[in-house]
Amino acid sequence: MKWTETLLNWYDENQRDFPWRKSRNPYHVWLSEIILQQTRVEQGLPYYNSFVSNFPTVFDLAAADEEMVLKLWQGLGYYSRARNLHASARWIVNEREGVFPKDYKSLLQLKGVGDYTASAIASICYEEPQAVVDGNVYRFLSRCFGISTPIDTGRAHKEFKAKATQLMADYSPNLFNQAMMEFGALHCTPKQAKCTSCPFHSVCYAFQQQSVYEYPLKAKRTKIRKRYFNYLVVKTPSGKTLIHKRAGKGIWQNLYEFPLIETQSIVDKKQLLEQENFPSNLASKIASIAPYEDQPIKHLLSHQHLFIQFWEVKLSEEIEDTITLKALEDLPVPVVIQHFIDNHYWR
């Protein structure tokens, strides 16, 4: 039996039942692909259901306020995906009268959509023969065919896409791509791959060479940056607090946070108060200041490790621009701040 037929037979017997597979609605497929980028299906599924429930059509998503979109996205991470999703929905409605792009090249015009997502939508919804290359496909093909090209080099994507296109041949692009991704997600996994029951183990290069977990290869390791965040959780005599919208192009853009002082290392109370950027409107009104926890919270991102300390800052008098705790509930915040609010909500 041919290699691709073996794969498609496996998929026919093992594919999971997901809501976005019940139709070829490009809006639903697009939502699922954006949500599942760098996200496990188990984590992403509730978000997909929430988005479809709140925004049944691209018109509904385009009409939504960005803060509502970010609030629904809260906890999923990589928030640029949500902002790009919202911007693309508005572009589809305003520039294309709500008509979703119907081919690979047109799909690339959507903000935040690259080769992978455009290929997925084009093949699944329109049967366009565009091979999808994601982490699952890199791993599966590199192991099975012994492809030693490091996947973090410029030539890797072109090489792996060409191999996948060759294997796709005249088969359904929709079924082929979904089968490739599903096999990598369920069978040829990063750890504890099911090699002994694999339908390809007799032809798998890595299995034959006993080097399964050496693939796929990478040329370089990701450099991790350490950052030290000190959040000032202000409490006024009336029970209000301070919150700011995070600006700039860094992490958590357009999400809300408590006043932040970033330091070069972990600091104590004296060192915190001596920071040049400690808010002057707070310094003269502090009744007490103390950390909530003895040790900072370690929050891991893909390229950054954050060491976060929340400081309770009680003021002796009211200040301007504070908000109520009720208003705070409706604002989109980073998940680490939401966890803090859930655990230390004061009334």
Image (tube, grey):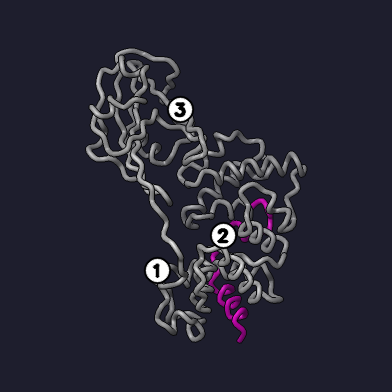
Dividing the picture into quarters, in which one does residue 341 lie? top left
Mark 2 vs mark 1: in front:
1
Amino acid type, label 1: Lys
Amino acid type, label 2: Phe
Residue 191: numbered disc: 1
User: For the point 26% across and 17% down, which residue is it?
Assistant: 287
Disc 1 secondary structure class: loop
Of pointers 2 and 1, the one earlier in the residue sequence: 2
Mark 2 vs mark 3: in front:
3
Residue tagged by mark 3? 244
Residue 226: numbered disc: none
Disc 3 secondary structure class: strand
Does 145 sit left or right of 269 as displayed? right
Q: Is the magenta stretch mostly helix, strand or loop?
A: helix
| Magenta-highlighted residues | 1-28
Quadrant (top left, top right, bottom left, bottom right) of the N terminus: bottom right
Quadrant (top left, top right, bottom left, bottom right) of the C terminus: top left
- For label 3, the crowd category at 10 Å Cα-Cα, with few meaning under 14, some 14 to 19 and many 20 or more, is some
